[in-house]
Amino acid sequence: MLDIYPHRAFYRPGEVVQLDVSLTGQVLPAVQIVISIVYLSDEMARLSEPIDQVSGDAATIEMTWMPPPVAPRGYGVDAWAVDGGGRVIAATSTAFDVLEHWTQAPRYGFLMDFGPERVSFDSTMRWLTSYHVNGLQFYDWMYRHDQLLPPTDIFQDPLGRRLSLTTVRQLIDAAHARGIAAMPYTAIYAASTRFFRQHPDWALRDAKGDPILFGDDFLAIMNPAPGSPWTLHLQDQFVQILEKTGFDGIHLDQYGDPKLACDSAGNQVDLGQIVPRFIDLIKRTATRIRADATVVFNCVGNWPIERAVESQQDFVYIEVWPPDTQYENLHRLIIEAQTLSDGKPVVLAAYIDPAQTVNARLTDAVIFASGGYHVELGETEGMLSDPYFPKYGRMSDELATALRRYYDFLVRYENVLSLDTRDTTARRSGQVTIEGIDTDANHLCHKVWVITREGPGCEAINLINLLDVSEPAWNGPHDQHVTPVTNLQVRCYPHRPVQRIWWASPDDKNPQMYALDFGVGTDERGTYVTFAVPVLMYWDLIIVEHAVHRQRVSDNPV
């Protein structure tokens, strides 16, 4: 078996890319590892290295390449093990990208095990790196919501978990060694009830004047208005963790309620108005300590998205709750947030039991095809299935393999899927049809959903297979199978002349772009192109290259 993945979650311009290659199998003669590095359809480099005889344990080598100083840009890597006779005995692929900062393409993940006995530091980061996770939310790492750093190295959190600050620091260091940002979970207004009783005037209250509690006497909701005593206290807590740990910024959470409350004097407090001011305050505070510090806020249930996007947070983070239960809602949340934020990256927290393999694959297909990202992977083989992250599930080998291909695909094609692209699905609705298959975007059952994005010189047409879906709920009951469709006859009415058409799929073991033959015709609707898509399992990507000046990546100065 041949495996390859980049040594880091992403690379900055001017950094050398290191690819770690391993070959496992029976006793084999010495072989060559050949890799092809591609940007979309352009081969950038072809490298080869000998690998020693393999017997039992994996033989490993490192291969390096200096990419052009162009960012942001995603690359594909195709690898083959070739024996002395030129026969390919194993093949695989991976991807990597060059970014100026991880938040340009935030592939967010999670950690939740900070016990003092933990030893799996680099192995966890190596696994996450193979999925290109480049930012990690350290969930419930802290001593208390109102006192983030513990009084002793080993401590118990509010729910009785035994944790260690040394473990937290070791995980931060291990993440940084792989180019992964470490983000501490915090809540903008949560305090222990003990802290609340010491500072009752700092709390928010309901219309009756009673304190607002979260859980069964677990937390009290404090007043996060700028200049309030609670805000000044929490601001100081953030300064302490940024000065005394290696965290790369602040992840801000809220609970979605209350939205309106009263302060201790009875004045109404509109949390929606406060949120952007609070975010900006913490962004200013964090960047005074660390110039490139990241700050992000959780819009629970997409609230208050219109206000939050006005802030200086680095990307948009939305925790998805009812009524946004259907696949089309995931697409809408991403597109609306991209539009409101003037194109900031969007991360969705949408929790799925990994036993629901079809849901997991379709959900990622929809999110990635919409130009978004999904916080779901963490620990080793872990997938978020609950808003309390320690209740995460474990993926089957089959799902873990499939999602690794999806994340490779996301990075390889990010320049047509997300970066510098915009959604055109509503405008292009009905302009892409499939013979004999319903593609109408209303009530997405028993259909192939067409999601389109446009970028410089091309259009990306994504086909999502919902033919076996009778209820389009992303976390609802599904038959856990999909029926592949072959030889799809597609008609597309392009708004520009077409030079070439490409097809690729993360469901295929070979994720490379394949050129499709196409014909041109005219009818009462205008000029169209027709072409055949070989197969659709869950998700296909079609790239329609416009017949305009095409700057090849090799034309860029190195």
Image (cartoon, rainbow, N blue to C red):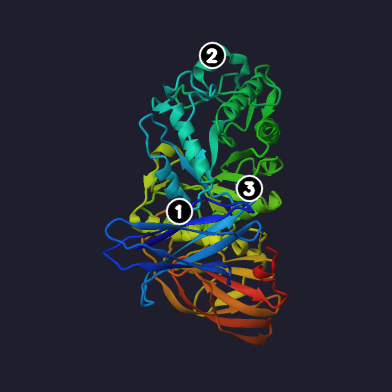
Q: Which of the two marks, 1 or 2, is nearer to us in this view? A: 1
Q: Which residue is mark 1?
A: 130
How far is mark 3 from mark 1, CA to CA? Answer: 19 Å
Q: Amino acid at mark 2?
A: Arg
Q: Secondary structure at mark 1?
A: helix
Q: Residues within 10 Å of mark 3 (few under 14, many from 20)?
A: some
Residue in the foreground of this view, choosing between 244 and 375 = 244
Label placed on residue 197? 2
Residue 36 as seen in the image, left or right of residue 546: left
Q: Amino acid at mark 3?
A: His
CA distance separating discs 1 and 2: 47 Å
Which x, y percent locates residue 513? 53, 72
Name the residue that disc number 3 marks: 101
- Which residue corresponds to the image point at 36% horizontal and 77% vertical from the top-left? 85
Relative image position of residue 241 (x, y in whole percent): 57, 27
Q: Position of residue 176 (x, y in %)?
A: 53, 41
**Label 2: how many residues lie within 10 Å, few (<14), some (14-19) or many (20+)?**
few
Q: Is residue 521 above or below residue 241?
A: below
Q: Is 268 or 421 nearer to us in this picture?
A: 421
| Viewport quadrant of the C terminus | bottom right
> Which of marks 2 and 3 precedes in the sequence?
3
Q: Residue 48: x and y, percent?
A: 47, 67
Tag 3 secondary structure = loop
- Name the foreground residue: 374 vs 445: 374
Q: Which quadrant would residue 544 be assigned to in this image?
A: bottom right
Q: Residue at x 56, y 31 (%)?
A: 187
Q: Which sits earlier in the primary sequence, circle 3 or circle 1?
A: 3
